[in-house]
Structures are given as structure tokens and as C-alpha cells.
Amino acid sequence: MVATRSARRRGTPLLALWRREDARATVVDFMPTRSIATLPFVAKPLREAQMPLLLTAVRRRCAKDSIYRHPPTAQDLLNNLLVGEPQHFCETWERGIGEWRRTGHQGDAAVKPFHGVGSCLELTGRMWHRGFARPLQAQNTLVKRYRVAMSYVDCGTTHTPGTHTPGDVAVGYALLCGPGAPTGPDDGLYATRNFIGGPRFDLTEPGVVSLLWFYATEEDNESQPLVVGVAPNIPYIVDAKFNHEWVGSWRGTVDISVDGLAVVQGLPVVYNPLESINLYNWSSGISQIGKIDVWYEKARLNQTWKYDLGPGDY
């Protein structure tokens, strides 16, 4: 009994310390938001300390016009704290297809070695704009950087000038997608619904396969050549860094490098909230998608997205 009372007396100064604004300010400067969120699960007495700590963190980290209800709930404050915090998704295929979901009924995929460096998802056959999707289980997120290793084995052997348009023979789509893109076999839409952009291999002329960046514009979809005349069975690392304008804009730019060499700068971007990654072949062929890295952050609650706007609003 004496030991218990002594432990309580030793614990009391710690809880009293949490009530001091200066002490909380020092702590929150080094404490990740997710750690603050778990405080009530560490010890019951810390439940009392969580709310003051959240209020201090919001005052120190967030913009003055952060949006939440008054009085705010703990979840409101946590949502505001997550704004701007970097998050990272990485896929190495070490655990197989894992949480990737088939979104179409054509083509096939299997995890295979990737040119002596890790593993890849090999996509085989025609899939149209539906293949395999990985929901990111995140809402209202702003993509900051996207890096993917990819190669192709076969990009089709027939391409008669005048009978195909660019994109008719294309494999290895690896698209960053927003709301409405398919994440399951029963979803009725295509991956290009509210997508942001991503690379693909395209048979641009007879015997010439090029690596392109496929992206959404204000009015339509466009393709930007990254490397003209790429070889089969050679891995290419595409690294795209996004530059967002501001919270009231759905526009921005992207700078893209291939194998460390800058190839495109200032390409226009129309922003939608990042919700999934979609991989597929448009036409018959074989492509390989290696390691995928996506860096993103939670956007402000009043962030403007392109999909929010109706025709004629932009």
C-alpha cells in the first residue's frame, strides 16, 4: 500500500508538468502527431493531458485559419495537426500482391524478380484502363513526390501509321488516381477518372517505344515524352516532384527525372486528392512495375480540387 501511494506521488509531478504551457510547447515541438494520438492508450492519467497538449500543438504548428469546430474535439485537432505532415507509401512486392485489388476482368499479373534488384509486378495482356489498384486509405491528401521503377518486355509488334493514334499501343501504366478511380472489380469507372498522372510505355511509331508521362489537363488528357526510343527489359526509374500553388488552387507543376537525369520541368498539373495507385496495360503486351514510392501529405480542409469544379468553373 505504501509503495502504491509513493508511486502515485511520484507520478503527480509529471501530470502537473503536462499542464504547464511552456512544458507542453517543448514537448510538442519534437512529438509526432501519431504519438500524441496514442497518449490515452499509454496510461489512463494521460487522457487528461491529451487535450491541452493538442491545443498547444495546434497553436504552434497550424495556420491561424485552421478549420475546426468550436469547441473542437480531439479528432478535429488531430486532423489539423496532420496537415502538412509528410507521409510515405512504399511497395517492394516482397509480400506478393498483398493489398492490391484486381479492378478488371482481363489480363493477368504475377510477382517476379526485377532485373536483379528486388521484385516487380509483371502485367500481362490487354486490360484497358482497369488492372490492379492499391487504395492508400487516406483522404484529402496532396501528392508531393512519386518514384517508380518500371520496364517492358513487349509493347506490341504491329503499329500501322494512320490506323493508330498515340496511346493505342501502350503498356505499363502506373497512375496516381483521385476519387472515382476503380479500387475493386465492381467499380464501373476507369483509372483515368479524376487521375493526376503517371508514366507508361507507348509504341509511338513503328519499331519505336517511348517512355511517356500521361497526365490530366484542364480540358483533356495529354502525354509528354520522357525518353524516346527505350529498350525492352531495361529498368527505368521515373521520379516526379510536384509543386503545388496554394490552398485555393488546384493547379501546379511537376518536375520529372529519369534515372536521375532531369527530362521535364514545370509540366502543368491539375490536382485531385490522391486516393489510389492504378497499374495496368492498355493494349496487349507485358510490362513490369518495380518498387513504388509515394510521398504525400494531408491537405488543408479548404483545399480546392479540380474534381470539385463543374464544367465552366475553370
Image: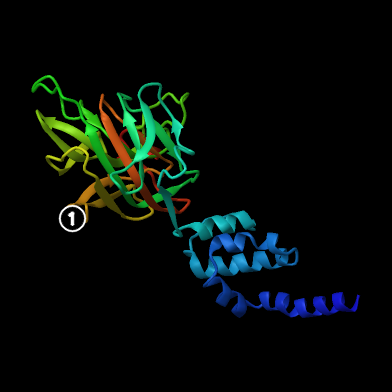
Q: How is the image coloured?
A: rainbow
Going by the image, does 225 lie left or right of 59? left
Q: Residue furthest front?
A: 116
- Residue at position x 29%, y 41% in the image: 198
Pick the residue in front: 197 or 55.
197
Which secondary structure, mark 1?
strand
Q: Horizontal and vertical percent for residue 64?
A: 48, 65
Q: Amino acid at mark 1?
A: Leu
The relative height of residue 225 versus residue 36 in the rendered view (above or below) is: above
The answer to which quarter of the image holds residue 215 is: top left
- Who is closer to the viewer here, 151 or 41? 151
Crowding near the residue tagged with mark 1, few <14, some 14–19, many ≥20 C-alpha atoms within 10 Å:
few
Q: Is 135 in front, or is 150?
A: 150
Q: Position of residue 42 (x, y in %)?
A: 69, 63
Q: Percent position (x, y) of residue 127?
A: 33, 25
Asked if 287 appears above or below 5 in the picture, the reply is above
What residue would you read off at disc 1?
A: 261
**Rendered position, 170 above or below 25:** above
User: Where's residue 116, x and y in %?
Assistant: 30, 47
Residue 124, by quadrant, is: top left
Asked whether residue 64 appears in the rendered view, the answer is yes
